Amino acid sequence: MIPMRHSLRVCAAALVAAGLSACPPPNTECIDGTEETCDAGAPPPDFCNSQEEADQDSANCHLTVTTGGAEPSLKEGVYLSRLEDGGVDRDWYVAQLPTLTPRSLLHINGGYQVPLTAVNFQINVLKQGASGVTSIATAVDRRAGGAAPKPVDIILPFSESNAKLYLLVSDEGGAQVRVDNRNTYSLYVEVEENPDTNEPNDETATTVTLAPGNGGQEGMTSGYLATTNDVDLYEFTVGGTGRQIIYLHMTGPTEHPTNPPPPYIFSYTLFDPAGTPVAEGRMDNATLPIDLATARLAAMPGAYKLKVQGYREPNSTTPIRGDLRVKYQVAVRVLPDLDTQEPNDTAATARTLSLSPNGTTSVTGKLSYVGDDEWFSVSLPSRATPSTLRYRVTTATSGGRFEPLTNTPNRQFDLVQPITTGATPQDRETACKNDRSVCPRGSDGDVNFLDTFCEDNSPPQCVHSHREEEIPRIANIRNLVGAVPVAVGRANEYLIGFKDQGLRDSKYADDRDFTITLEWRDDADEAGRTGGPEVLTVSGTPVVAQGEITFGYGKYLDEDRYFNSSDGLRGLADYDAVDTDKDLFQFNVAATVDQSWQVSWELMHTNDGGTRPPADLGVELVFCTALGSAVDGGICTGQSTRVFAYNPAELTPWYLPQSQSNGRQLFRREVGPSSTTVTAESVGCSCLSAPRLAAGAYFINVGAVDRTSNDPLRYRITQSIAAYPANFTTPDGGGGTCPVADGGCGFAR
């Protein structure tokens, strides 16, 4: 007889020799039991097909139960196959248990060690009793698609000495029962002592004794989630007086098992003495080493309970299996709250700070536990001249009594103003949302976010400045700094909030010092502009306009700057009610025909000897059809605007078709010892058309963009005009003349 694996090559040789045109189809192997015929050989030998056969056939159906950590005795080389009479295989085995103890664990393991099988391997554990057999555990390797099989592992407390068990092994069954005549499965039974010395503690808590140490009280314990649906309950006592912080840190073995990973996701819940859950957490998945920590303010003295278990999805009843490989540790510490600013976790309990005109004040606190919001208040008396409130938050990188709860803090700073305008709460909320004289709003603010401060607080809160760390999305972020204008002619009360806003297990606390520094400074530059724009005349002789941008975060013209060149000064969620201080200039022009326009601006470097300016300029050109009243911000008849700002990229000049090949360097940037100068290159053919000059003047609103520092920005803008068209230099060193498009200058149309 020719073996099937050789039949095809033999047939092929016969075809060549005899000139035949076809071979019969190869014999079919029995693989998953769905074949109509299996003519490639008989099904494999099969035993233990009933409870009676299991009792009688000790050679094939009795399992050796190992104890004391001995190497398990494997039952190997057996199949779940289709029987000769067309039935489906179910294998029965007998396991006779030895003398057991109250801490004994029954451990059963079985399954396929191959990449693929059709069988959903199932083990049903039955105990022999006076009235027959009763199921005490069932587990199945239920898989979808072509997923590789996993071992079925059952661990359960079992202390009945000399018990007789039956193990019923089969496919899970259902609409179609699968078999596998190609691959064998293995099976073993062992009895071990529970390595968790705290058991039984599923319902009765194990006491964790705390003793003085490291500036507080501390204690340790350890355990295993060894069995199916295992729960470990611990209890510790918070005593003493004053504010106490509970710090918990749960870790797993140094070598976390990954092949396979534990069959559960480690989780915990902390309960206060009243039985109320006050903290919970879980690992993201079972493959990660166990490492969870939290810090919570003890609401009351008494006995706190910690429940450790495998995470269960809401409404799930699926058993959560245990694992004897994973020993976890729990460190408990009870520490006194050392933050001298507490209690100040709410706006109502904000600590009052004192700040004088042109003065500085600072305050130091700690984020020592989850939910440790820090609130401060400062009242600035009414002043008749403009001023600026500047703030900076610095955070220590060491000094806490425990490690930060997460490596990705999401600390937030808010500078808000309580709104008291309005007779009723609804009136005050409406004023907060809609009255810009009461609560200014930036054009790029998230309306829903800002409305929340108006709706959820009493009195409503107007957000003047918001900063939000975005680690690790923005590396080296340093955005906890800002400056806002102070309203003139009225007293101003501000609330300052500093907190962490992380989600779920990413809640942050570090017990380290932070310092908030406030400065209240006169704004001399702004004081000189209260009567309207500064008026200058532009002509063939260069004219210089100068000033200082003192507040605002300065919008980014290119979002890539958030991640690349901002040095972490800005976060994507940052907000200021006034995005930038703006200085308004009016430039009178006698010319009535097209004019070439030469413009450059000089930006002073920071006062601390820095090598670059704190920001770039955004030059907003405002053209009018006729002059009217104008205030800071620019108002005139027929107003239209264009924004002019430095761009290092090659851009297409207005007079050429848009094309990459027509790209030109339109700006030149020169860095000096104490200032940086940006000049509009002549190849850009910057010009002012006659219609733009019809009012006899144009305005420039100057603001800060693309900030890299929150320092005030000092600047000088130099302009002149000349007859149009002007000559320019081409990139190759040649020359050219600005074109006349449609009869005139097309730059500012």
Image (cartoon, helix red, strand yellow):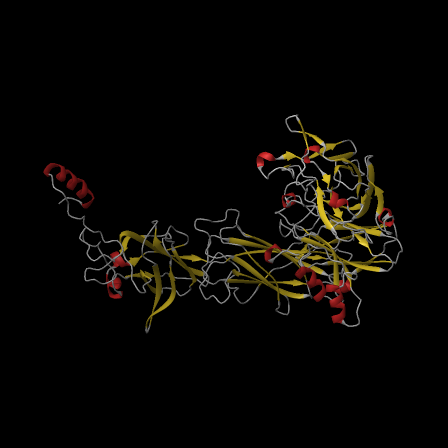
In the image: residue 13, left or right of residue 519: left
Q: Between residues 164 and 707, which one lies in front from this camera angle?
A: 707
Place of residue 202 in the rendered image (x, y in percent of width and height, measured from the top left)? 52, 65
Counting labels gives 0
Rendered view: 354 above or below 455: above
Place of residue 464 in the rendered image (x, y in percent of width and height, measured from the top left)? 75, 56
In the image: residue 536, left or right of residue 736: right
Residue at far left of view: 18
In the image: residue 389, left or right of residue 217: right
Task: Classify residue 541 by image quadrant.
Answer: top right
Is the N terminus in the top left, top right, bottom left or bottom right quadrant?
top left
Q: Between residues 184 and 538, which one lies in front from this camera angle?
A: 538
- Report if residue 550 is visible in the image: no
Place of residue 123 in the rendered image (x, y in percent of width and height, measured from the top left)? 35, 61
Task: Classify residue 714 by image quadrant.
Answer: top right
Residue at far top of view: 733
Residue at point 38% right, 59% down?
142
